[in-house]
Amino acid sequence: MGGFLRKPCTDRTAKRSDQGRTLRRRKGKSTAPPTESAHLHSLAHKAYEGLLGILLSGEMGPNDVIIERRIAEQLGISRTPLREAIRRLEGEELLQRQADGAIVICPMSVEDFLNILSIRRLLEGEAARKAAGRVSEQELLGFQGRILALSRKEESGGPAVQDLGPELHLCVASAAGNRMMASVIADMGKRTRLFTRRFMPLSERRSQVCEEHLALIDALLENDGERARACMERHIDSVRAHVLNKLAAF
């Protein structure tokens, strides 16, 4: 009887031991996939940034078809991370998949664009007010020097010059201390640039934009939140007025 009484205990012990070995094997196998996953994530992010850069450059316009092979070659990446980037941009409604499977750049109506500017005016005005006293003097003086240099140039410049304004806007949004608000501002900024890049080059408004940004920086340097808000609102109002004038001329 003693043998029969001990056997179930032995079976249970063996079963627990087997389960423990199985769990240890699974844990041992889990070290490689995260490394591979991180690599794939990095490639997908690179593909996203590259494809977004193409969209923002003005090379392509609304309803233009995304040719995966051509874009992959242009960016020097494989089509697998590019497809991840395309899915992400579909989720952001910057790209859309048509019934035949083609991926095209989403068109934006004038009404949608004006609504975006209304949102930006509210959020970025508040962000500028809250950012006063939170952006370092060194960072603001750096922007000031770059903008002054831009204002003296006759040419519109390359991508680094084109991105200077958005960089300042994102700096102000981040300094406001509201992560969700900064995320919305970044998204609205992308959509603004997608709408304007093809027909409103920086060279047309370079002097005015520089003046508006310098006024904003002056207010921030003096920690004057209300003046910073007013400067940001005037800047976005001037973008709206210029776009409407351009559209009326078409």
Image (cartoon, grey):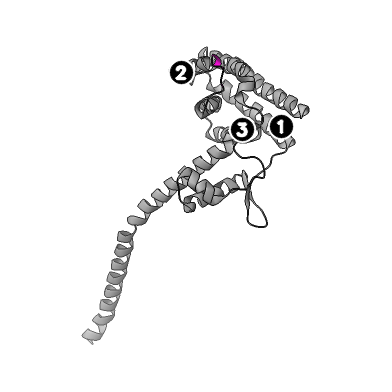
* 13 or 162: nearer the viewer: 162
Q: Residues within 10 Å of mark 1 (few under 14, many from 20)?
A: some
- Residue at point 66%, 19% (across, down): 234
Q: What kind of element bears circle 2?
A: helix
Quarter of the picture containing the N terminus is: bottom left
Magenta: main secondary structure equals: loop
Q: Residues within 10 Å of mark 2 (few under 14, many from 20)?
A: few
Mark 2–mark 3 Cα distance, whole angstroms, equals 23 Å
Q: What kind of element bears circle 3?
A: helix
Q: Earlier in the sequence, mark 2 or mark 3?
A: 2
Q: Point out which mark residue 193 bears.
A: 3
In percent of width and height, residue 212 lies at 61, 17
* 71 or 18: nearer the viewer: 71
In percent of width and height, residue 198 lies at 64, 33
The residue where tag 2 is placed is: 142
Is 50 displayed left or right of 104 in the figure?
left
Q: Residues within 10 Å of mark 3 (few under 14, many from 20)?
A: some
In percent of width and height, residue 57 lies at 57, 34
Residue type at mark 1 is Leu
Q: Earlier in the sequence, mark 3 or mark 1?
A: 1
Mark 3–mark 1 Cα distance, whole angstroms, equals 13 Å
Q: Point out which mark residue 114 bears.
A: 1
- Which residue range is magenta in the image? 151-155
Disc number lying in front (3 or 1): 3
